[in-house]
Image (tube, rainbow, N blue to C red):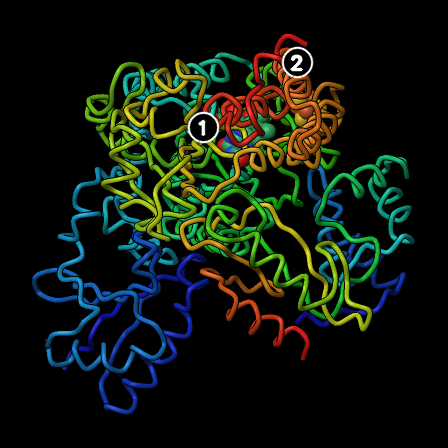
Amino acid sequence: MSVYESWDAQRGAEIIAENSHVEGATLVILHALQEAFGYVPEAAIPMVAEALNLSRAEVHGTFTFYHDFRRKPAGKHVLKLCRAEACQAAGGDAVAARAEAKLGIKLGNTTADERVTLEPIYCLGLCATAPSAMLDGRVIGMLDEARVDALIAEAQQ
Amino acid sequence: MSSLRIFIPRDAGAIAVGADETVAALEQAAAKRNATIEIVRTGSRGLYWLEPMVEVATPKGRVAFGPVKEADAASVLDAILKDGPHALRQGLTEEIPWLKRQTRLTFARCGIIDPRSIDDYRAHDGYKGLERALTLTSDAILADVTTSGLRGRGGAGFPTGIKWKTVAQTSAGQKYIVCNADEGDSGTFADRMIMEGDPFVVIEGMTIAGIAVGATKGYVYIRSEYPHAIEAMNAAIAAGRRAGYLGSGVCGSKHAFDLEVRVGAGAYVCGEETSLLESLEGRRGIVRAKPPLPAHKGLFGKPTVINNVLSFAAIPFILAGGAKAYADYGMGRSRGTMPIQLAGNVKYGGLFETAFGITLGELIDNVGGGTRTGRPVRAVQVGGPLGAYFPRALFDTPFDYEAFAARDGLIGHAGVVVFDDTVDMAKQARFAMEFCAIESCGKCTPCRIGSIRGVETIDRIRAGERVEQNLAVVEDLCNTMKFGSLCALGGFTPYPVMSALTHFREDFGPAPTSLQAAE
Ligand SMILES: Cc1cc2nc3c(=O)[nH]c(=O)nc-3n(C[C@H](O)[C@H](O)[C@H](O)COP(=O)(O)O)c2cc1C
Ligand code: SF4
């Protein structure tokens, strides 16, 4: 689990200033903001635009294009299940169905208690030890029902 | 007493099956026995069914144990200390047949050296290619790359020598080297493995490119799904700078070259080179129309060499005097070796680097040992989500760009995903369309809308609705996508869809009776 700071405009401005000197800085800044706050707060978009001398629409466009960037905080734990072909071939469909049933949510959602966000991911590059998952940045391979259950129990704690 | 040297991968694939826990358990067991051990975290050898693999240095070479789970660590350590037998003992690593029958040129060091140690890299022939390149003219470097016959390993197979020459011939003040480490294809992990297991070889290859074309700055664009690779590359770049291999005077020469890692944000299309450049510039990853080629107008409008990780990683061997030797491997116009990745439902999955020409059947049945589930192999997808599904009937196809193309398939980044006989090929065709819809950059209508229509139509077919008519719609959509798309995301999605339809027609519902056909 990662602990994030709560949004603070001054802290946001600092992060933006720290990263705006590099070439093509938009993604670098968005990543840095998300790393600090767990998502990219709406209020940060115009600040990024101003720092980089871009229009608000350009930064917003970049922000919304990429699957990684969040508009709001995720659950306390994020469980990403690989849904790409190599994992499908190795029983990934059953693993995903099991996780959805256990958590009572579909992929792409967060449990009502905001403990667990369950997301699809298209390939973790662990395709010889499929099916795979990532729990809060930790990689797990060779998933079967027992391992999925254990992961979910861990995430629900 | 000198301490025992034990090697355990820090590769993400090994960590995913418990390598870190095994390390902790080994350390504990050693402390209990008062044994002094030194654990070196290497890359993976690529024999993933044996991960976590534990190796120990012996006078005869490294001896392997695997898969060594946390619970096996103590008994494995006892076997190591007594040089005794153990059920997980695999003998000398280099003699394991799966490894022995490979030709490891690009992956020669992966799994052997400590990826955090530039000294270890140098002790294993590292930087020989750069040292020689520094004594050559740009033309001589380009000649070596051309002689090797190296074609881009990212998928399209474009000759690397020609690409570099194009950039070398431009006269811009600023040029760039970009390493495409977006590796989005399911079933591929060679880029990840080499970045984690031998990052300096990628850096050396990029540095040689910089010297050859006159570029002083490079970027490595790594997908965010690869945190371990990002860490490894950043550490290696820092070490390279400290040792004078990167920076204002590379190895004391007049050439400047430096590198920076940039992290993607979960968009498959950003593996496409122009989309990647847009992303590096901080924008939406919308594909650019070509021309202009990136070689003429690439990153920030400057001439840019953009190559796959494995293309750069092949360069140091070639420049260290191996151009001719490299070209001597392979078949037809596919020269050298290919790091093939066996994935999915396969018994012996992992990285198998070999000369082009091995047949698909040999790869799946002999090397891969068939499926992990033990059921018959029914379909194999080669080349990622844009690659075709091949049935057993095509297993005589040799691994070669042209041979695959002749059978409406592609090698791509050489990922091979094995499926057993429980696979539903109509579902796989649907997924191909769905993936295209999710990942489309949105620039062309056939890709953006066609893929969504494709999903809907295949859903109808799977529900048994007007099967023949809807199959004709799918075929029509595929043709429109194939010919009306700007890049290979929309353009090649028809490969998995049409190959599923052609080779596995029975999965799409009953074939028409003569009566229906006459309708
Ligand atoms: C949708 C799409 C995704 C791609 N993904 C990758 C990728 O992840 N890695 C890569 O090296 N090339 C990828 N390519 C190919 C690149 O566009 C380009 O051909 C390659 O980076 C050139 O390097 P090479 O000549 O060394 O292969 C992709 C192409 C398309 C159309
Ligand atoms: S084919 Fe698809 S991904 Fe490629 S440029 Fe067109 S819309 Fe974008």
Q: Is residue B176 visible?
A: no
Give the mark toward the camera: 2 or 1.
Answer: 2
Image quarter where the C terminus of chain B lies is: top right
Disc 1 crowd rating (10 Å Cα; few below 14, some 14-19, many 20+) is many
* Front position in the image: B265 or B510: B510
Residue B420, how many percent across, how many down?
41, 43
- The residue beneath circle 1 is B412
For mark 2, does the 10 Å Cα neighbourhood hold few (<14), some (14 to 19), or many (20 or more) residues? some
At horizontal 57% and vertical 71% (from top left) the residue drawn is A149
Q: Is mark 2 within 8 Å of ligand 2?
A: no
Q: What's the amino acid at mark 2?
A: Asp
Alpha-carbon distance for marks 2 and 1? Answer: 25 Å
Q: Is residue B145 above or below residue B463?
A: above
Which of the four quarters of the rendered structure image does ligand 2 lie in? top right
- The image quadrant that residue B456 belongs to is top right
Q: Residue furthest top?
A: B518
For this view, does A140 lie left or right of residue B130?
Answer: right
- Is B371 in front, or is B513? B513
Say the numbered circle drawn on residue B476: 2
Q: Position of residue B262 (x, y in %)?
A: 60, 44
Image location (x, y in percent) of residue A6: 84, 69
